[in-house]
Image (cartoon, rainbow, N blue to C red):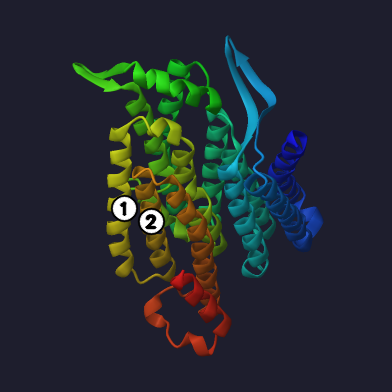
Amino acid sequence: MTNILHNLSLAIVLLPLIGGLIAGLFGKRIGIRGAHWVTIIPVGLSFFLSVLLAKFVIIDGQSYNGVIYTWAVSGSFHFDVGFLIDNLTALMMLIVTFVSFMVHIYSVGYMQGDKGYQRFFSYISVFTFAMLMLVTANNFLQLFFGWEGVGLVSYLLIGFWYNREAANFGSLKAFLVNRVGDFGFILAISGILNYFGTVDYAQVFAQVPALAKAHTMISIFPGAQWSVITVICILLFIGAMGKSAQMPLHVWLPESMEGPTPISALIHAATMVTAGVFMVARMSPIFAFSQTALSMVLVIGAAGALFTGLVAIVQTDIKRVVAYSTLSQLGYMIAALGASAYSAGIFHLMTHACFKALLFLSAGSVIIAMHHDQDMRNMGNLKKYMPITYVCFLIGALA
């Protein structure tokens, strides 16, 4: 069973990368039809294999934690590429591959006639690979690789229509704001390596109770002693604030709406913005020993849920309404994690991935029908002309 889970995980992660590389490097040679088939089929296979993996892990109770290969050795430190497959990972793999598969299919129609058609499919497949690397990681180095990978592809996709000034501005804003969060994340990983001597999850989690019991302190400011566990947790959460667009690092998400609508559904509703939520849930064995950090998570999450939800009410751009709604929903997830209701937060992550992707894709249908007019003040009575989109929008809104 260990070999089966190992091989399944490897196939799920690598298939989208292979499709993305073929579409990106040989796009002109394989043509428009080739570009979407060579990416849709691998991502579809990844989804069906994820369903099989979920059956083994969630239903049959199997798990896997192993090293694929050693990337680098520095003294006593080992930096490995490995997989940790448990219930949380299996669920995230299902979400990522399912939403990505649906978005790939939807994009065939939405991006029809676009000059960057092959480039678009290459980007979204490589994004899927990076996100899968992030959720399957069994160590902090691989987590950071996936973390930066989704950030890079997000930057490329927000600025996909690079001849638009607003798209370039939006992609640059997303990139720079996320660097602020990533700085905290790098410091957290450095602290973990310094105090635990490893970046492997299992080894770190095993050592946390002893470090907490020893009340190990660190002096950040002269005369101020802070718990090492609290400092690491807060720095980890600063990383999550950037990626999951929590106040005050939320400003990049509304600007990211300048990218094509399928990107909003894939990256800025269902997968990338939930990376921070996933990371805090994965790090729950560390956060459990810091009430201060959990309180900070709870307050920031609750504030984001309230205030960005209020901002959504006064927006007139159809995509910005859904974007601010996403910020509010992410606040709910973060608040749940801060209250130590990890299962509730992840459950909402799963449901939100589905209904918010549906809302964005439905909004894309309306935008195409309105000849790319996104102002809701110019819309109305569309039910008569777009009954299927109406039903989909209604289902998403009710969810």
In what element is the residue under mark 1? helix
Q: Nearer the viewer, residue 325 or 349?
A: 349
For label 1, the crowd category at 10 Å Cα-Cα, with few meaning under 14, some 14 to 19 and many 20 or more, is many
Q: Residue at x 49, y 38 (%)?
A: 282
For the residue marked with disc 1, what is the amino acid? Gly
Percent from the top left, x then y, of residue 16?
A: 70, 48
Left or right: residue 15 compared with residue 206: right
Percent from the top left, x then y, of residue 28?
A: 76, 55
Q: Name the residue that disc number 1 marks.
A: 304
* Structural distance between the alpha carbons of marks 2 and 1: 7 Å
Q: Is residue 176 visible?
A: no
Q: Earlier in the sequence, mark 2 or mark 1?
A: 1
Q: Is residue 303 visible?
A: yes
Left or right: residue 278 compared with residue 241: right
Whether residue 170 is situated above or below residue 393 in the rendered picture: above
Q: Nearer the viewer, residue 290 or 382?
A: 290
Checking the image for residue 394, the label placed there is none
Checking the image for residue 327, the label placed there is 2
Q: Residue at x 76, y 48 (%)?
A: 22
Whether residue 77 is situated above or below residue 338 in the rendered picture: above
Q: Residue furthest left?
A: 223
Q: Residue furthest front?
A: 60
Percent from the top left, x then y, of residue 43?
A: 70, 53
Q: Are marks 2 and 1 in contact (CB under 8 Å)?
A: yes
For label 2, the crowd category at 10 Å Cα-Cα, with few meaning under 14, some 14 to 19 and many 20 or more, is many
Q: Quadrant of the N terminus?
A: top right
Whether residue 397 is situated above or below residue 260 in the rendered picture: below
Whether residue 73 is situated above or below residue 68 in the rendered picture: above
In what element is the residue under mark 2? helix
For the residue marked with disc 2, what is the amino acid? Leu
Q: Residue furthest bottom?
A: 384
- When asked about the image quadrant of residue 176, the answer is top left
